[in-house]
Image (spheres, rainbow, N blue to C red):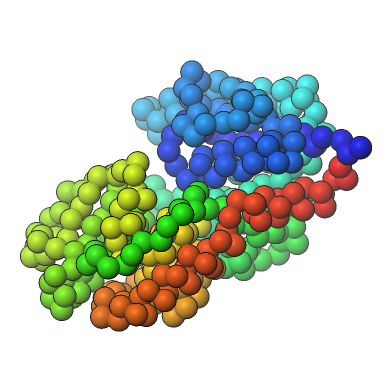
Amino acid sequence: MKKKLKLAYIVPGIFYPSGMERVLTAKVNYFVHYFDYEIHIFVTDGKGLEPYYPLDERIHLHHLDINFDGIFRFSLFKRLRLYIKKQRLFKKRLEAQLTALRPDITVSLLRRDVNFLNDLKDGSLKVGELHFNKLVYRQFTDRRFPVFVQKAISSVWQMQLLKNLRKLAAFVVLTHEDAGYWQGLDNISVIPNPLSFYPVQAAALENKQVIAVGRMTYQKGFDMLIEAWKTVSSKHPDWILKIYGGGEKEAYQLQIDRLGIGATCFLEDGTDTIGEKYYESSIFVLSSRYEGFPMVLGETMAYGVPPVSFTCPCGPRDIIVHKRNGLLVENGHIPQLADHICYLIENETERKIMGQNARNDVQKFDIAPIALQWRTLFESLKPI
C-alpha cells in the first residue's frame, strides 16, 4: 500500500480574489479529493479571515501570524527594518512547524520565503512554482531611486534568485515561453494553470460586442486597446467594447472622452458573473503588456469566444494557435490590434469557427490533466 503523500504549501494568504489564490485552492481541493493527499497550507497574513475560495475541509490551514502587510504604512527605512525582523520570525516559525509536521514535499509559491527556503532543515524536498514571468519577477522598480540603482538592485536580486532556484528539487513555471528565459536551470518543468470552469454552452457570437477583462492597471494595456478601438469604432460604429474590472478608471475614461468614443466604449466594474458577460460577447481582447499565465484567456475560450491577443510575455503563444482558435498580434502593435478585431467583426463564419476551435482546444487545461502533471512530478521526486 502506498504511503499517503504529505504536502505543505507556503503562500502569503488565500483571502483575496486573485488568480494565484484561486489556482492554488482548485489544485489542493482536487489533490485531497482524487489523490488522497494530506495537504497543509502555511500563510503569513490575513489571520482571522476566511479563505476567499472554499477549501476542502480535509485541508489544514496554518496561520504563522507574521503580518507583512502591516509594514507598508511606514517610511521606507522603517519598513526595511521591520521587514528584516519579520523575515527572521517567518523563517523561525515556519521551520519549527515544518519540522514538527515532516512533510514529504514543501511547495513554495516563491514569495518572501524564496531566500531561505532551501535552508529549512525539516527534511522535505523543496519545490517552487512561479505565477509570474521572469521578465517582471524580482525586479526593483522604486522610482524614488535612479534608474541605474534600480537596475543594479534588480541584477543582484536575479543572481541571488537563480542561486536559490538551482537548489530546488523542482522549479515549475506556467509556460514554455517563460521556461526559455530561465537559462542555466536543469530542474525546470512547465505545468500551466488549470481552467477555472468549463460552461455547458458556448456563446452564440452574434451580439455586436467586444469584451476585455482585468484590473485597470498599466499591465493590462487598456490604454492601447482604447486607442485601437478608435479605429475599430470608426469602421464599425454599431459595435461596442466593454472593459470589465476594478482599479483606477479616471485616466482611461479621460482617454475615451478625448478620442470621442464614449458612445461605443464602456468601462464597467468587476463582476462575479463574468460568465454572463462572455455569453453576451462575440470577441475577446487581451491587450496586456505582460502576463504570467492569463487565466482570463482560457476562460473566454472555454465559452467559445475567440480571442485577439498581443503576443506579450508570457502565455498567449502557449494558448492561442494563430488563425485556428484566435488571432495573435505583434506585441504592442496598436494598428494591427485594430485590424485583427475588425477582421473578426467582418468575418462572422471565421469568427464562429475560431470560437468553436477555442472551446475545444482549451480543454487541455482542464483541472484533471493538469493535476496529473503535478502528480507525475511529485512521484518522480519521491517514491510514494
Q: Is residue 235 above or below residue 39?
A: below
Q: How far across and down, in percent of the image, does residue 292 sit?
A: 50, 56
Number of numbered discs: 0
In which quadrant of the rendered view does residue 328 lie?
A: bottom left
Q: Is residue 103 visible?
A: yes
Q: Quadrant of residue 300?
A: bottom left
Q: Is residue 58 above or below residue 323?
A: above
Residue that extends furthest to the top in the rendered view of this protein: 48
For the C terminus, the quadrant is: top right
| Residue 106 located left or right of residue 335 | right
Residue nearest the viewer, comparing 71 with 52: 52
Q: Is residue 175 left or right of residue 217?
A: right
| 5, above or below 187, in the image | above
What's the residue at 42%, 57% (across, down)? 201
* Left or right: where 361 falls relative to 304: right
Q: Nearer the viewer, residue 19 or 150?
A: 19
x and y percentages locating residue 356 in the rendered image:
45, 70
* Quadrant including the N terminus: top right
Question: Residue 376, position in %: x, y?
Answer: 77, 53
Residue, far right: 1
Residue 331 in sight here: no
- Residue at 54% from the left image edge and 68% from the top image edge: 361
Q: Residue at x 88, y 39 (%)?
A: 2
Q: Residue at (27%, 68%) from the top-left corner?
A: 206
Q: Nearer the viewer, residue 342 or 121?
A: 342
